[in-house]
Amino acid sequence: QVQLVESRGGMVQSGGSLRLSCAASGDIFSFNQMGWYRRAPGKERELVATISRGGSANYADSVKGRFTVLRGSAGNTVYLQMNSLEPEDTAIYYCNVVRAGINYWGEGTLVTVSS
């Protein structure tokens, strides 16, 4: 069983920065991929960024150059550093872990960017 605990999001002004973290329990050595998705108001959930066990990162075009996904040295924590935030980044952000082809999700944390 995998449990994901996300840090609290928050409200930030446009152009500001915020860092999210997610701590995963369970057999971390079997985690194939960790990352973040988000659901904006009235929209479907979408990929933000993922990072493989080998450290390869993948980003949505909308966040490239602004967001960075990092994996903690112990392998059980994933971070999302968000810079140059825009009102369009307002969403509930969900931590995601893939293990043996199964997706595990955090409860989500709200990030609000004001203009």
Image (cartoon, helix red, strand yellow):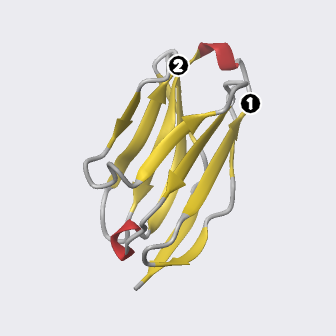
Identify the image quadrant of the N terminus: top right
Mark 2 crowdedness (10 Å alpha carbons): few <14, some 14-19, many ≥20: some
Judged left or right of residue 57, residue 78 is right
| Mark sitting on residue 53 | 2
Q: Is residue 50 above or below residue 21?
A: above
* Amino acid type at mark 1: Ser
Label 1 vs label 2, nearer the camera: 2
Disc 1 to disc 2: CB gap under 8 Å: no
* Amino acid type at mark 2: Arg
Helix, strand or loop at label 2? It is loop
So how many labels did they put on this image? 2
Q: Is residue 71 above or below residue 53?
A: below
- Residue 36 coordinates in the image, percent (x, y): 48, 45
- Residue 67 coordinates in the image, percent (x, y): 43, 51
Judged left or right of residue 89, residue 105 is right
Identify the image quadrant of the C terminus: bottom left
| Mark sitting on residue 25 | 1
User: Distance between the Cα atoms at labels 1 and 2?
Assistant: 15 Å
